[in-house]
Amino acid sequence: MMSYKQWLVLLFIYIVFMLVGAVVFLYLEIDNELAERQDILELKRKVIDLVYSLENGSRAEVVEVVQELGDNCGEDFLHIDKNKNLVWSYWNSFFFTFTVITTIGFGHMSPATPWGRIFCIVYATIGVPLNGIVIASLADLFSSKVINSRMRARAKRYESWVGIAADAALFLLPGFVVFLIIPAAILVAAEEDWNYLDSFYYAFITLTTIGFGDLVAGERGQSIFY
């Protein structure tokens, strides 16, 4: 059985694996995103030049249509923002590696280049089993240190279903608080548009690796770092 020190070494390797993966993903994807951003800026300049070349009588109607199109596409075609946050920043890349190896896969960002996708396949092939080993070893360590050491002392309590239910509640409560209640409270403060139910829902969907992607923390301004 793995010792506590051995598990800390494994955790260190796990974190380094994500940090290295974040650097590689950023290196493989950033140039493509910058090129796509430049194409969008050029398109915006053409749209702006076209709109303002129209006569005043027809300009307002075209502006309204372009604004509606931009709202549906998630882009403001009438304003150029050169300082817009990049999707593939280092912190976003680190968050992405976490969603890959935990199989959550929110879908808010993904590799678009051929080499990025090849690396993602290789990275997940190694990272998913590594994630499973880290979680399984932690569960084994916890159970051996906490549960098994008290099993004999509690044998009489398990003769009643009430004792079993009480111990199950005490066993689940710390994890419920640490992984759901506290993160939900933090997310309420961090996300302006979320209420506590949204935050709790997001924490649960993330913890269970369901990862619908309907809510993703830190998406304001496409700067995802939580």
Image (cartoon, rainbow, N blue to C red):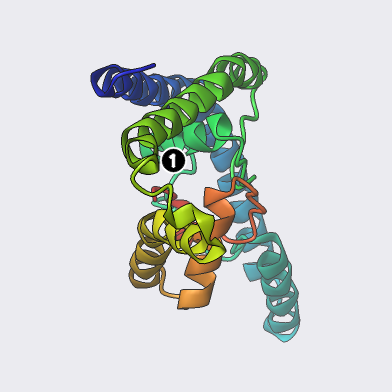
Position above or below: 47 against 91: below
Q: Position of residue 225 (x, y in %)?
A: 39, 48
User: What is the crowding at mark 1: few (fewer than 14 residues within 10 Å), some, or many (at least 20)?
Assistant: many
Q: In this view, does 5 lie to the left or right of 55?
A: left
Q: Where is residue 164 in the image (x, y as percent from the top left)?
A: 50, 57
Is residue 189 in sight in this rendering?
A: yes
Which residue occupies the foreground of this view, 15 or 175?
175
Q: Is mark 1 on a helix, strand or loop?
A: helix
Q: Residue 29, percent across and down?
A: 53, 27
Q: Which residue is located at x 66 percent, y 69 percent? A: 71
Looking at the image, residue 102 lies above or below residue 70 = above
On screen, residue 223 versus residue 100, left or right, reads left
Question: Which sits in the foreground, 202 or 43?
Answer: 202
Q: Name the residue under label 1.
A: 92
Q: Which of 222 and 12 is in front in this view?
A: 12
User: Residue 11: x and y, percent?
Assistant: 34, 25
Indicate the amino acid at tag 1.
Answer: Asn
Give the image quarter of residue 70.
bottom right
Name which residue lies at 53% across and 21% down: 127
The single residue placed furthest to the left in the displayed view is 5
Residue 194 visible in the shown view: no
Q: Quadrant of residue 36?
A: top right
